Each structure stands twice: as structure tokens, then as C-alpha cells.
Amino acid sequence: MATVEKVRKMKADARKRSKQRVETKNELASHAIIALSELGYARTGLRDIATLSGRSVGALTYYFDDKIDLISYCVRLYKEQFVRQIDAAMSGHNSSTSIMEAVTSAFAWAIEHDAHKHRLWYDIRSQALFEEAFRPVVREIEDNLIAMVVRFLTRLGRPVDNGQTMYFVLDGLFRVHLQAALEGDTHAPQNLKTAMVAVLDGME
């Protein structure tokens, strides 16, 4: 019996350490992504990230293998949060009109408040054309984004057989209006909403 209890305690301790490790990595990533989103991939090294995020290089290298590992983790973490935000925007609404308003507003909010973080995603997606190490995380994120768009289309009662194509259309709209917002266009969030509604209404 004592052996069984000991094993249970060991398992519980292992789960606690694992949870603490994930929490620490998420905390480091949340600070690092701010630095990365300001400077971009090419202009930052681990020392720059450590300085700008208020952490030591040792802390970063303890939890992440290298800059690519850190950036991949940061982008994955942030885009997962974005997907949850869009899913949350869909919940609690029944009519297609209210769902459309809630989701397009969430996309617009992302451009208005988190433009620099989303810019990092496009930076890394472009880097994946040259850096093979980025390709798995980019594929994973895009698969999640496509699935999100399919859920959105389903809630709107639109056809989902072209979900991947619609993802690329909406992604293109998002990137163009993100660029406009980064250039100082204060109308970019509302223009994105208008463009998304026009495209989605065209599916009816």
C-alpha cells in the first residue's frame, strides 16, 4: 500500500512540475512576443529578446532550444489565443446576423489592438519559405485557422466544402487591412468588417 501511495505521489509531483514548466514557458513567451512583434524575426537574437522582455538569456535557453524554438512557441501560443477569441465571439449567438457581427468585430478588434503580434505571424509564415524549421508550426497554425473558418461558416449556415479557400480569402483581407492599420489607417478595422461581410454575403 505504501508503494502505491508513493507512486501516486510521484505522479502528482510530476504533473505539478509539468504544469509549472508550461506556465513558466507561457510567461516567458508572453514577454518575448512583445519584443519579437516590435522588431521581427530577422532583427532579433536571443540576447535582444532577453533584454527587451526583461529576462536573462539563460532563462530563455533553459526552456527553449534556440530562437526558432522560442518564436515558434510564441506564435503558436498567440494564434491559439486568437482562435479561442473567435470561437468565444461565436458562442452565445443564434442568428447568422449576430454571429457575423460578433466575429467580424473580433477580427477588427485584433487589427486595432494586436496588429504587431499578428504581424509576427506573417513574418514567420514568410520565413517558412526559407527556414524549414518553421514549416511544421506554420502548417499546424494554418490547419487550426482553417478549422476555425469552417466552424464560422457552419454557424452562418454557409457551405463548408470550400472552407480552405475561404480561409485564404479571409486571410488575404486580414493581411491587407492589417498592413493598412500598421501604416496608420484608422479606418482599417471597420473596412475589414465591411469587406468580410461582403465576401461572406456573396456566398449565399
Image (cartoon, rainbow, N blue to C red):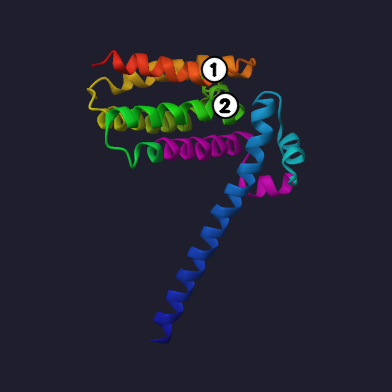
The residue closer to the viewer here, 105 or 62, is 105
Q: Residue furthest bottom?
A: 1
Q: Quadrant of residue 103?
A: top left
* Callout 2 amino acid: Glu
2 or 1: tag closer to the N-terminus? 2
Residue 94, percent from left and from top: 27, 37
Q: Residue at x 33, y 42 (%)?
A: 92
Q: Amino acid at mark 1?
A: Ala
Most foreground residue, 197 or 158: 197
Mark 1, residues whose alpha carbon is within 10 Å: few (<14), some, or many (≥20)? many
Q: Position of residue 29 (x, y in %)?
A: 61, 43
| Mark identifier at residue 44 | none
Which of the image's four quarters has the C terminus?
top left
Quadrant the N terminus occupies = bottom left
**Residue that numbered label 1 is attached to:** 188
Name the residue located 34 percent from the left edge and 14 percent from the top edge.
Answer: 199
Q: Are marks 2 and 1 in contact (CB under 8 Å)?
A: yes
In the shown orientation, is residue 26 left or right of residue 8? Answer: right
Q: Is residue 181 above or below residue 66?
A: above
The residue carrying pointer 2 sits among few (fewer than 14), some (14 to 19) or many (20 or more) residues within 10 Å by Cα, namely: some
10 drawn magenta = no
Q: Which residue is depicted at the point 27% across and 32% down?
A: 95
**Residue denoted by label 2:** 112
Queried whether the magenta region covers residue 82, the answer comes back as yes
Q: Quadrant of residue 197?
A: top left
**C-alpha distance separating marks 2 and 1:** 8 Å
Q: Which residues are magenta?
A: 57-86
